[in-house]
Amino acid sequence: NAEWPPSSIDVLHDPENYVEINFADYRPLYDRVGPVMFRTSLFEGLDSPSAELRLLPDMNSLLISQNSTQRAVYNAFWLPKQFPKIALKVAVKSVKDCNVRDGRSIKREIGCHLYIYQKLLGTSEEGRHPSPIATDDWPTSEVLGYYLDKKNPGMSVLITRKLFGPDFFDIIRSECSPRFASRNTPLYELNKLDWCIIAMERVAQLSELGIRHNDLKPDNIVLDMFESCGVKRVDVKVIDLGAASLEGTKEFTGGTSWYESPEQKLLEFYTKKHNNVKRAQTIDIGQASDAWGVGQSIIEVLLGRRMVDHIRPPFGTGPPELVDPPQEVHENEGPLWWDRDEYWTVPPRVWLEYIRSVLSLDSPTQKFPICAQAARYVFDRLMQVDPRQRASVRSVAEGLRRLAKGEIAKHI
């Protein structure tokens, strides 16, 4: 295992001599400079003529998150060389033991971030509307720098701006606290509904840019609280593009089992578990797959309940998994045969009924009555087994916006 943090990255010992800015202040410079490509690896100091990376003095607050393997995210300071004595907090994602599997995930994420940057830059150069880069119309956390090693992807590093706010799972967890009761008001519900609408707009934006996230869940939807021009603002970002797919590419990796769409589970079954390329090519998967994941996530945060807490084995069914679907490809076989009940531990249509029941979606007594109405709206339009019957995420976000306006009018 490589030492982390590496000794090649210095600690910022005198933060009091720097002006710490937020990304809203850094954005004009970012619009000109864009993502910085480092010439050397993290363990060689991440050399670049444009910026330096420095660690936080407090080692106890260094780690932001780490998955079950060795992929970890750390706090650091970004020091642009064009403006000495200015510091910006960033999140550094790397692989502690440089293993190839986690490295491929970071490599894929770097590719998606650069693709987003180029697409948004192209949009602004066409002059149709103001640059999304110069505004805050960005679906995920902006990439500031990266080191990409194609031969040894485990050495790759991604540096994005740090988001200051809880993720949607933290919001659900906070609502279980006894102290939360005093904060449960119509205003809180309308704020939460607004966060959910923005989250869906961000997912729709990724889809319109040609990216399928593949791992949408409450943990990967994050509030970003910041101050701009003396005004406190709240935005929502979709993070962790390590499992994402670009349009037109055949590369695919699975997401989180509880939030995968039926067609995603099927594709994962034939690619990762059985390496049946011929059968996998018959699976029709598109942007509607993300509609399932974001729909389920939004429903959970609106209701303040997670389905996994109610149907986790051995007391519940668990998520639907494939048992023994056919391996051979037959002529004239329809693309949606996967809804056959006998191929699943729990048929997806039955599982949806379980979800609706355990989340008490239709109960007349709701902790969040406004949000429950919105949750039913999302469920009916996005939680459909057949992806062709799912509404677009953008259209559902617009429907929720109309619902929110009606509720606001009732409380004015």
Image (cartoon, rainbow, N blue to C red):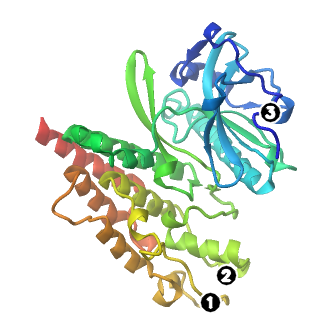
Vertical comparison of 240 with 335: above or below: above
Q: Nearer the viewer, residue 237 or 203?
A: 237
Q: For marks 1 and 3, give the CA distance.
A: 49 Å
| Residue beneath the point at 25% across and 56% down | 372
| Residue beneath the point at 53% across and 49% down | 206
Query: Which residue lies under the disc numbered 3?
Result: 6
Question: Disc 2, disc 1: CB below 8 Å?
Answer: yes
Tell me where residue 158 sits by quadrant: top right
Would you say 65 lies left or right of 194 here? Answer: right
Query: Mark 1 belongs to which amino acid?
Result: Pro
Query: Which residue lies under the disc numbered 2?
Result: 279
Vertical comparison of 10 with 275: above or below: above
Tell me where residue 263 sits by quadrant: bottom right
Q: Is residue 41 visible?
A: no
Q: Position of residue 238 (x, y in %)?
A: 51, 45
Residue 326's label in the rendered image is 1
